[in-house]
Amino acid sequence: MEFDFDNVFYAIIAIVVVSFVYKIVRYGGFKAAMFGASIKRTIGEVSDSGSRFGRLTLKVHELEDSKGEKAVGLELVAKTIGSYSMTPVTLDRTEVKNLIDLLNRAISSK
């Protein structure tokens, strides 16, 4: 009996795809699956002043996990002529407070 690596490869790919489709259905969408929690609402967004090479946007989402715990999702979107990149960051309450503190220190420093 021979061991067929092709079947193992296809099985691993199938497991990855099925698990991601499950997350999409469970959390209610592609972005929510990327955050690992449901998006309750989008709070807002800020954009850079723009450059000739591309544009960055930071979107802030209110998240809620399956246990009902709230979190904040930061979605960093980078767009250029030939590319699009979305990076999700999920922060709990403590991490959000630390980020707020860092941002306040950055704008108040002389």
Image (cartoon, helix red, strand yellow):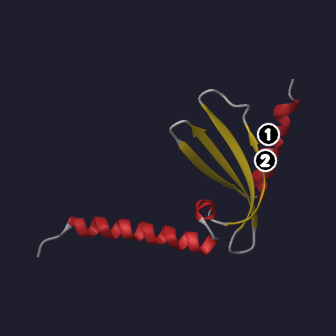
Determine the secondary structure under disc 1. Answer: helix
Where does label 2 land, which residue?
98
* Residue 89 percent across, percent down from the top left: 65, 52
> Under tag 2, what secondary structure?
helix
Q: Nearer the viewer, residue 63 or 77?
A: 77
The residue singled out by tag 1 in the image is 102
Query: In the rendering, at what x and y percent does residue 10 appear?
Result: 30, 67
- Distance from Cα at disc 2 to Cα at disc 1: 6 Å
What residue sits 35% from the left and 67% below the top? 12
Residue closer to the observer: 62 or 67: 62
- Residue type beneath disc 2: Asn
Instruction: Answer above or below: position of 69 versus 104.
Output: below
Seen from the viewer's position, the closer of residues 97 and 85 is 85
Residue 35 location, x and y as percent?
A: 63, 60
Give the total number of marks visible in the rendering: 2
Residue for point 60% across, 49% down: 87
Residue lying furthest top: 110
Determine contact: label 2, label 1, CB under 8 Å: yes
Q: Looking at the rendering, which quadrant does residue 17 occupy?
A: bottom left
Percent position (x, y) of residue 18? Answer: 45, 72
